[in-house]
Amino acid sequence: MQDITLWFQDLLAGNLIFTPQTLGYYWEGLVTTTQLVFLSLVIGLVMAVPLAIGRSSGRRWISLPIYAYTYVFRGTPLLIQLYIIYYGVVFFDGIQETFLWPMLREAFYPALIAFTLNTAAYTTEIFRGAIKATAKGEIEAARAYGMSQGLMMRRIILPSAFRRALPAYGNEVIFMLHASAIASVVTLMDLTGAARFVYARFYAPFEAFLFVAAIYLCLTFAILYLFRWLEKRLLAHLKPA
Amino acid sequence: MRHVNLLLAATLAAGLSAGTAQARDDAEIRLGIDLPYEPFMYRQADGELTGFEIELGEAVCDYLDATCVWVEQDWDGIIPGLLARNYDGIMSSMAITEERARQVLFSDPYYTTPSAWFSLRDREIDIEDRDSLEGLVVGVQRATLQDNYVSELYGDLVEIRRYTSGDDVLADLRAERLDLTFLDAPVAESSMELDAEDTRFQRVSDFIKEPEHIFGQGVGVAFRQRDRELAERFNEALAALKEDGTYDAIMARYFNYDIKL
């Protein structure tokens, strides 16, 4: 252990910007970014499945409100949504007295809400496209077997739709990681927040931002490989023999 | 953009060759500012720029037979913007510190102000009692001296939130997201309207100007290191304005106490 500490001190010796303290900020930022992106993606995914089913429903009173939701959240910049949710909520009188305040008071939860609603809207549309693209023959075959609508959705449509949606959803995950860079405008110390702090402290934009760009690149590569592995496994049957 | 710089370079060169001659009648001097920073620089209701530094800057430009062009720039990018030649100087309440002086060339200081702690009015806070501050949430403007002060002296005691603009700090103080803020005192007192009956804010500490390694020696105009001549002309103009009463007259319009240096 002592060897590692010594090696580390050696490595940083004479470096004014990347001190153990600033690296600590970057590490904190990495943790915050990962938490924020991971949680919003998981919650967004869980929300998107029923929403996508509703969105492809023939009943307009179900599909229209969902369309309105995805239209609004895909039609406005995420930054604006974040501003509205963070700075906007405090203009409701008495919000400080409600049970929501302990959460809204922090910067993390408003950011999480904004990111979740945003990614859920995109994911809903991705899944809806995949559901719509289900081969007619499969549906007809399911009907011929006497499957109910629910059973058909569960056994036939959704499993194949998820596979079709996989590449597009992989992109959405990467976009979400990159979009999370705006979290620092509401004082969240995410990766970009850490970079801005180092930049502002040392007036060294190149070092601060190149370093953080390298971290984002590594994260992106990790996501890319995860999805490539998933695609290899789940879409193997689509490959030419 | 570019031709203005060329023009300036040309007039500077002319100034150099002509010795003391002041033949730079229609030169523009572009100054970077971060708005709003009441009462130093802000927009009136009609959009017109005004404030102590704006008026002082205009007076300097007048003295130098030049025109001031004010360029808006967010604070945390204001030094890189200068180095990238988006403007020729920064006249935006920038305190002279060692770290900054490595990047830019400062004029002589032209004012100094204290900082102070502020909170909502109904809060009871004792700044002297460090233990009672533990865990409180403090808002500061990112990369300011106030940020440095709180980070260095209270960093492991309180939770620090860093904002891009002073407005956002006030918004979150009002929203009760912040317990405290540490800001430049004249700016805070002006934008919090502390004189007014119905203000929601209060100052909870004395004026703080120490230690010098954080607060520096006062506020100066920042130039690129190579623009030594421009800095010297500014120094000359500032000295003259301080001498002939123009400075005092401008100061009296904005402050009822002395900030002159």
Image: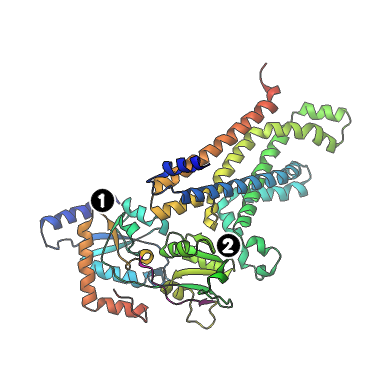
Q: Secondary structure at mark 1?
A: helix
Q: Main secondary structure of the magenta part?
A: loop
Q: Residue tagged by mark 2?
A: A87
Q: CA distance from mark 1 to mark 2?
A: 42 Å
Q: Position of residue A58 (x, y in %)?
A: 78, 42
Q: Label 1 is placed on what type of residue?
A: His
Q: Is residue A97 above or below residue A85?
A: below
Residue at position x 43%, y 59% in the image = B143
Q: Is residue B43 above or below residue A79?
A: below
Subunit that carries the residue with mark 1: B
Q: Residues within 10 Å of mark 2 (few under 14, many from 20)?
A: some
Residue at position x 25%, y 68% in the image = B60
Residue B3 is tagged as 1
Q: Residues within 10 Å of mark 1 (few under 14, many from 20)?
A: few
Which span is picked out in magenta?
Answer: B201-212
Viewer-nearest of discs 1 and 2: 2
Front-lying residue, B166 or B105? B105
